[in-house]
Amino acid sequence: MKKLSKEESERYKAHLSLCEIDLPGQQRLRQSRIAVVGAGALASAALLYLAAAGVGMIRVIDGDTVSLSNLQRQIIHSTQDIGLPKPQSAAAKIAALNPDVDVEPVCRMLDADCALQLLADVDVVLDCTDNYDARVLVSDTCVELGKPLCFAALSRFDGQVMTHMPGTAHYRTVFPAPPTREQLECRSCAVSGVLNALAGIAGSMQAAEAIKIIIGAGDLLTDRMVLIDALTFTFREVRLKN
């Protein structure tokens, strides 16, 4: 593998000091390719931490534009970005943080026509979407491709985080039936609200899981889901069956 430059060695000094990462792990991060589906609340923290970690390529997939109501929780975007496609806005922030990261903004929603193509050539996928249909599509595509997937979801003060590796529990096995219309309305951030800092917690956990997958260290959240209660600041683990 190509040696780190002097600037890279200084930038990633804190990672290089971890025996679980060290030089080989940092080199693997530099060669890695990660797709992040959704460029909103969860993605805000996840994208910045992945970029700061030195991931080689990040593909940001989202067909939405930045609006004023997004800024309460989607901190990768700024007031001056209102009206811009979210992937383009996120790409500019990533470039400012770490210009060595190759960012591919994809300004369209992931759908059945493009899912296989956009996720086939990456090492890890992060599901930062906000609806059942999108989550099922991302999960089913990763299962079909044999891709690792880091999932998170938010509602009010509650968060969910889990990781899928080939052969382990995935989104459809945990949530086999679509939610009712009443449940959808209840879970909508626009209707029920969401604590903004909760997105940072869950999105950071997604980034940590993705980094662990790339460097091959630690225990992943496979066959288990962490439930976050930000009101009481408790974390509960639920075992999952595939």
Image (cartoon, rainbow, N blue to C red):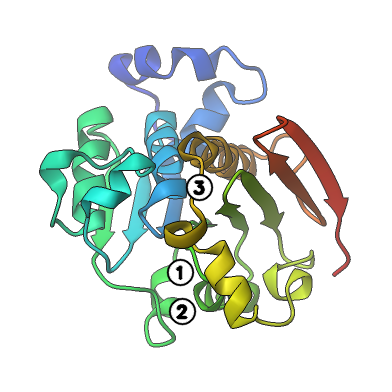
Q: Describe the element under mark 1 as helix, strand or loop.
A: helix
Q: Residue shown at 67%/51% (left/top)?
A: 160
Residue 179: quarter of image? bottom right
Q: Residue shown at 36%/12% (left/top)?
A: 10
Residue 37: quarter of image? bottom left
- Of residues 81 and 58, the one nearer the viewer is 81
- Of residues 135 and 82, the one nearer the viewer is 82
Residue 86: x and y in percent read 25, 55
Which image quarter holds the N terminus? Answer: top left
Task: Characterize the local packing of mark 1: few (<14), some (14-19) or many (20 or more) Cα atoms within 10 angstroms.
Answer: many
Depth check, mark 2 against mark 3: the one in front is: 3
Q: Is residue 81 left or right of residue 175?
A: left
Q: Amino acid at mark 1?
A: Leu
- Of residues 239 and 167, the one nearer the viewer is 239
Of labels 1 and 3, earlier in sequence is: 1
According to the picture, the residue beneath numbered tag 2 turns out to be 116
28, above or below 134, in the image:
above
Residue 220: x and y in percent read 74, 44
According to the picture, the residue beneath numbered tag 3 turns out to be 194
- Residues at marks 1 and 3 touching, judged by CB atoms closer than 8 Å: no
Question: Separation of disc 2 and disc 3 at Cα?
Answer: 31 Å
Of labels 2 and 3, earlier in sequence is: 2
- Of residues 232 and 164, the one nearer the viewer is 232
Which image quarter holds the C terminus? Answer: bottom right
- Residues at marks 1 and 2 touching, judged by CB atoms closer than 8 Å: yes
Tag of residue 119: 1
